[in-house]
Image: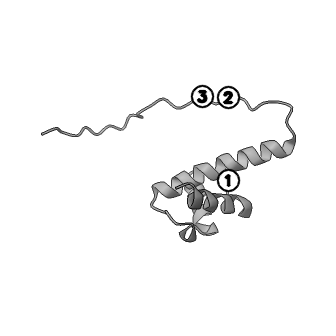
């Protein structure tokens, strides 16, 4: 019988961040960062067992952002999080 090993070490090294491309309109950077924030929040919610958009109200999403030390998301970002949970399955 095999014995499972528990480790607290990361299983992989994190990816290195690259600088964003220069010369794009400001709206592009805003929407890009909004999408990244929505993805981080959606992943965190899925990890905590929230698998239906109806159970991810704005308060719950903002509470999750607080636990992750992320600035509270706007209503638009909260809608994006619910859309990722709904269509990302």
Q: Is the residue marked by circle 3 packed among few (<14), some (14-19), or many (20+) residues within 10 Å?
A: few
Q: Report the residue marked by disc 3.
A: 16
Q: Position of residue 43 (x, y in %)?
A: 53, 51
- What residue do we see at 52% from left, 66% from top? 52
- What residue do we see at 67% from left, 58% from top? 80
Q: In the rendered image of this protein, does residue 41 appear above or below residue 23?
A: below
Q: Nearer the viewer, mark 2 or mark 1?
A: 2
Which element type, helix, strand or loop, lies under badge 1?
A: loop
Q: Report the residue marked by disc 2.
A: 18
Q: Earlier in the sequence, mark 1 or mark 3?
A: 3
Number of numbered markers: 3
- What residue do we see at 67% from left, 53% from top? 71
Q: Position of residue 4 (x, y in %)?
A: 23, 40
Q: In the rendered image of this protein, does residue 65 appear above or below residue 19?
A: below
- What residue do we see at 70% from left, 58% from top? 77
Residue 70 at least partly seen: no
* Residue 77 as seen in the image, left or right of residue 22: left
Residue 71 is marked as: 1
Observer-nearest of 81 and 48: 81
Indicate the quadrant containing the N terminus: top left, top right, bottom left or bottom right: top left
Residue 19 is marked as: none
Q: Are marks 2 and 1 in contact (CB under 8 Å)?
A: no
Which element type, helix, strand or loop, lies under badge 3?
A: loop
Q: Is the residue marked by circle 1 packed among few (<14), some (14-19), or many (20+) residues within 10 Å?
A: few
* Residue 79 as seen in the image, left or right of residue 10: right
Q: CA distance from mark 2 to mark 1?
A: 22 Å
């Amino acid at each position: 019988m095999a014995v499972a090993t528990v480790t607290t070490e990361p299983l992989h090294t994190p990816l290195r961040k690259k600088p964003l491309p220069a010369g794009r309109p400001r709206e592009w950077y805003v929407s890009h960062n909004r999408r990244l924030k929505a993805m981080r929040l959606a992943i965190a919610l899925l990890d905590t067992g929230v698998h239906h958009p109806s159970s991810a109200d704005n308060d719950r999403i903002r509470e999750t952002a607080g636990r992750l030390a992320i600035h509270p998301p706007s209503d638009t970002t909260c809608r994006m999080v619910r859309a990722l949970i709904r269509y990302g399955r």
